[in-house]
Image (cartoon, rainbow, N blue to C red):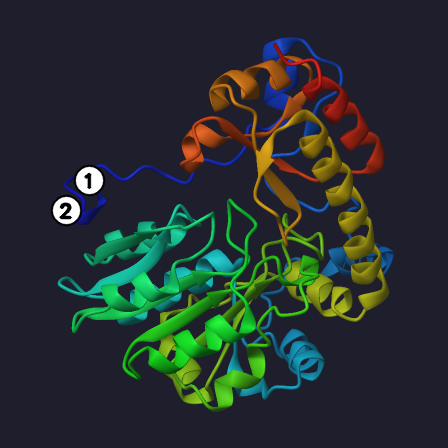
Amino acid sequence: MNVKETMVGLVPYQPGKPMDEVKRELGLKEVVKLASNENPYGYSNKVKELIKDSLNDLAIYPDGYARELRERVAEHLQVKETELIFGNGSDEVILIICRSILSKGDNIVTAAPTFPQYKHNAVIEGARVKEVPLVDGTHDLNEMLRAIDDKTKIVFVCNPNNPTGTYVGERDFFVFLKKVPENVLVVSDEAYFEYVSAEDYPVTVPLIKDFPNLVVLRTFSKAYGLAGLRVGYGIANEEFIRAIDPGREPFNTNILAQRAASMAIEDQAFIQDCFEKNRVEMKRFENFCEKNGYNYFPSQANFLLIDLKIPGGEAFHQLLLKGFITRNGEALGFPTSIRITLGTKEQNERIIDTLSNLS
């Protein structure tokens, strides 16, 4: 059976190695996964009790409209319920956007390296991908503007950027947004929003009222600690949301995910605690890098991309033998680096000690 031409040569997204697999392969009793930018502190205790209470309802289809979650997120963000779309992770919202907008002959503009699902979904739809190299790890918005042509349908801005952790500031983003043609969609992917400490980070959600071509993406997979339940969402002009909603699968967010996310967004004290711990641990890694002469991109996320001056695969393997799963920079476009998710204080102290003894 032949698949569509655009699928030929594509490879599935490659997640970090599972902990059980590493234990089995290497005969390790303990493995610490610091590869997928998950929250090392788990999720709100309030969510744990709610999930237990929901187990008796698994035979029932979830609310296809996700009303309770929709109401809570709308209240939290001070937007209309009709300005939201929910997905099986923000990855699915990206898929829905590409499915709804792109056709063969269109193109998207994106940075490189950045989150690979923008390119992946565009290619499946037959669109051309125009990649603009990062400058000092950050989006080059001026070159991205120059890359836009009459076939461009979407511009993706990953902010903070994955895998570098860098960010586009408010002034630069606003100037960029005003210059993008009104018929070109701007997607501001803010998966790591809750970890941002920069005072000049863009306040994007209110902009959807003045820019009907703006979509803001957020997720419950990172700071909220619900990666295993897969809930993400988009915020945009209600007319645009209504137009792309038919591209969403029915019941695409499950009943546990909806309820857990509804409760999680209520516990902002947990999010603040995770934010503060993350900044402390980020400083720990930065101090280590500066002490040892390792270059890194200042990060507004919960990970750090570190240039260890040896092949990323070699560093990845040495850390793996010691029970740490990280992300090989060779696969991310940074051949002598690794990306490390910030863990707990104890986990970070241990991996820093290991990094200090890399050969």
Q: Is residue 297 left or right of residue 329?
A: right
Residue at image location 66% in from the left, 17% down from the top: 23
Mark 2–mark 1 distance (CA, rounded to whole Å)? 6 Å
Question: x and y percent of residue 152 in the render?
Answer: 23, 69
Point out the image quarter for the C terminus: top right
Check if mark 2's residue and mark 1's residue have beta carbons within 8 Å: yes
Q: Say which residue label 2 marks.
A: 5
- Amino acid type, label 2: Glu
Question: x and y percent of residue 216 in the render?
Answer: 50, 72
Q: Is residue 147 above or below residue 41?
A: below
Residue at image location 71% in from the left, 79% down from the top: 76
Q: Is residue 109 above or below residue 302?
A: below
Point out the image quarter for the N terminus: top left
Q: Is residue 297 visible?
A: yes
Residue at image location 56% in from the left, 25% down from the top: 308
Q: How many marks?
A: 2
Question: Could you say whether the residue bearing mark 1 is in a helix, strand or loop?
Answer: loop
Question: x and y percent of residue 92 in the render?
Answer: 45, 59
Question: Could you say whether the residue bearing mark 2 is in a helix, strand or loop?
Answer: helix
Q: Say which residue label 1 marks.
A: 8
Instruction: Out of 86 and 147, give the one closest to the viewer.
Output: 147
Quarter location, residue 147: bottom left
Q: Is residue 12 left or right of residue 149?
A: right
